Amino acid sequence: MIVLLTGGTGYIGSHVCVELLNSGHDVVIADNLSNSKIGVVERINKIAGNSSVVFRKLDLRDYESLELVFHEFQFDAVMHFAGYKAVGESVYCPLKYYENNVQGSINLLKAMLKYNVKRIVFSSSATVYGMSEDVPFHEYSPLNAVNPYGRTKFFIEEILRDFQTANKDVMVCILRYFNPVGAHKSGLIGEDPTGIPNNLMPFIVHVAAGEQKKLSIFGSDYSTPDGTCVRDYIHVADLALGHTLALEKHKQDSGCFVYNLGRGKGISVLQMVRTFQKVNGIMIDYEFSERREGDIAVSYAANTKAYSVLGWKPENTLEDMCRDSWRWYKNSKLMKL
Ligand code: NAD
Ligand code: UD1
């Protein structure tokens, strides 16, 4: 298949790109490089050996330039990663998020309709489940996004459902990611946050590297075994595999399909810190601080649907996630990224 990856030079898109190339697909990346660098393309090609990915720099908000790429290639499927993802920023700049994430998605669907592209896989998030304490989250659990970023994901899911209802021969696959961490085993691609990281793993890595003095653990009095928050961390390589399996499984189908992509294992902040220390032999200085606003105590996936329907079995352990995140960070410094 020829697959269009919007946001394909980003963290998750780049790993999915490698997975698609390895499975024999042709890939075209469309990205405006607002949160990624062009050098990723060369490194993807290096990992994938003989394959070579096509890159087009474009912004999804610009419908005319998006049409050009649909005109140039006859896509069999689209995987839609492009969007902004910083929860905190979305609270202060909601319109920026609605315009980029929602309008960008609408433009993409318009182009798909016009150029007769019938399959789309969309990057949603566990954030659509919101503040519920009813864990694990099932695909049918109530949705209750609590910040503008989360609501963009919820609205796009709704738009996709309506789009599919109106276009019965279309296949929509919504993948709800839990907490993606880790990096490609080659150390050539990984998460590359600008500035001070907000998320746990990138922050731990920055402390390990001496870029931050210590980790603040947000809250020590949650009703969890050690008092710190519990999340479902999933290696980005396993996440990437979920995409190719979903596309393969549903390539002849029409309808709307939703899958949680998480390991279904709750890991506390302290567990994560200790595992990182043990695996990489580096002490992570930390202190307990106030709870972070908007955090829930426990979030993890019910993932039996992805297991049974897609045959998806995440293989990477928490140790792998800690090892690969640190390897990627060291390599990215060596490569002067
Ligand atoms: P990322 O920022 O690394 O990648 C997103 C890519 O989209 C970037 O390369 C950026 O340049 C590009 N982009 C943004 N707006 C664009 C536009 N208007 N036109 C063209 N390109 C544009 O993010 P990621 O971590 O790879 O996330 C990919 C998707 O998965 C996002 O939709 C995100 O919301 C979703 N998601 C991510 C996580 C996570 O923790 N990383 C969790 C759940 C869901
Ligand atoms: C965050 C986003 C969520 C997104 C997810 C993807 C928020 C509120 N939510 O989820 O929308 O889908 O990333 O990965 O930002 N922690 C610390 N100290 C830190 C950083 C984090 O203790 O410096 C704790 C947090 O309190 C949380 C856990 O580590 O309990 C994980 O945090 P994070 O990596 O930011 O992910 P989420 O909050 O689960």
Image: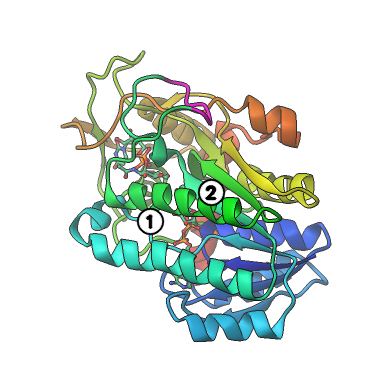
Q: Is residue 302 left or right of residue 62?
A: right
The residue under label 2 is: 161
* Numbered marks: total: 2
For the point 45% across and 81% down, which residue is it?
A: 62
Q: How is the image coloured?
A: rainbow
Badge 2 crowding class, 10 Å Cα cut-off, few under 14, some 14 to 19, many 20 or more, is some
Q: Position of residue 195 (x, y in %)?
A: 30, 63
The kind of residue on which mark 1 rests is: Lys
- The reply, left or right, for residue 15 in relation to residue 216 is right
Residue at 26%, 42% in the rendered image: 214
Q: Which residues are magenta?
A: 135-140
List x then y, in percent, for residue 318: 55, 32
Task: Please state which amino acid type lies under the numbered disc 2.
Answer: Arg
Farthest-out residue, front: 166
Tag of residue 11: none
> Looking at the figure, which quarter contains the N terminus?
bottom right
Whether label 1 touches label 2, CB < 8 Å: no
Which residue lies under the disc numbered 1?
85
